[in-house]
Image (spheres, grey):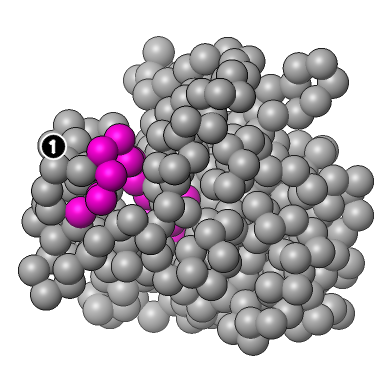
Amino acid sequence: MHKDFSAKIMSNVKAQSSNYFDIWILKFGFNKIRLGLFIIPVLILLILSCAKEPPIFKKSKFLMDTVVTITAVGTKDEVEKVIDATFSEIERLENLMSGFKEGSDVDRINKSAGIGPVKVNRDVINVIAKAKEISEITGGAFDITIGPLSKLWGFGVKKEYIPQEDDIKKLLPLIDYRQISVDESKSEVFLNKNGMMIDLGGIAKGYAADRGVEILKNMGIKAGIVAVSGDIRTFGKRPDGKAWHIGIKHPRESEKVLTAIDLEDSSISTSGDYERFFIKDRRRYNHILNPKSGYPATGCQSVTIISKEGILVDALATGVFVLGTEKGMEFIESNKSIEGIIVDSKGEVKVSSGLRGKVGL
């Protein structure tokens, strides 16, 4: 089933016309295909071509349990090998950071929780250190130690499963980013308490997009896009000299674009309550868990964050979602390096001051 579905997705992504490219970016986590759960698109990447065939080449590959699409300005002969090298780098990162791959750095860290430190790759150190910084500035709204709760809720595994309150409370002491010890000089990570688990699903794809752009630039590509699922990083300009045009998906109307924005040398990521969810007794339970309560975060339908770094927007889209509409927008406005769009629980759209007049909302 996995192979057939993957082939179908890849076939759909490759479909294009001579004047218009339409790439549907699917926001999957590391385990979603493995579990047989397939998520509707979160972001739509619209690449509008010039009047004549533009010198743009794009290629997609199934990595990190999702479709990764790389677009580069240049002909196929000029850029294909570079794109393949970028795919290889993203695959390497997946093998390090997936918690579902036996022997990965994250798997070894989790199995050694409360036992002893684990020597890991420098990329893993970089991501965990950044995750701790983002946890600190969001007051713990973003926390990679959410792993035990994610496993308990089992989105995609336990159909419409609501854990017992006592079971949730028992795990809450394990959810604490401050209990991650990182020794950068030795490249070691230690989870201080037995039973702790880290989950890099909310930050690793953004990091992969950053690394992908770095590889492309280092190999001479002047402009393009790396889209690791719904985490998108752009650099340079389109062949017509304009910025890349990015559409943000409507959280309640799956075929509709909420708004669009032009981006150049920037990253964008959206987290929504429609990605993985179920409804029981007229209440929506989504996969974005509040680290403090242990229950799905409420108050937002979707959060989009825009900044320079992919790793930052990936994590902050989740963190701001957990903070909620009011505190989330206060957080965005207090940080000059980021902008954001929040759709609250009633469907009302809040736009940060730096985006007003730029997104048509």
Residue under numbered circle 1: 103
Going by the image, does 85 lie left or right of 327?
left
Q: Position of residue 59 (x, y in %)?
A: 39, 51
**Is residue 258 shown to the viewer in this render?**
no
Instruction: Tell me where residue 162 sits by quadrant.
Output: top right
Q: Position of residue 215 (x, y in %)?
A: 27, 70
Q: Give the answer, above or below, for where 118 lies relative to 209.
A: above
Report whether 102 appears left or right of 6: left
- Residue type of the residue flagged with mark 1: Gly
- Kindly identify the residue that appears in the image at 75 percent across and 73 percent down: 330
Q: Nearer the viewer, residue 84 or 312?
A: 312
Q: Residues within 10 Å of mark 1 (few under 14, many from 20)?
A: some
Camera-nearest residue between 262 and 298: 298
Tell whether 39 sits left or right of 117: right
Q: Residue at x 82, y 38 (%)?
A: 253
**In x, y percent, where is residue 72?**
41, 66
204, 223: nearer the viewer: 204
Q: Is residue 230 above or below residue 245?
A: above
Q: Quadrant of the N terminus?
A: top left
Q: Which residues are magenta?
A: 190-208
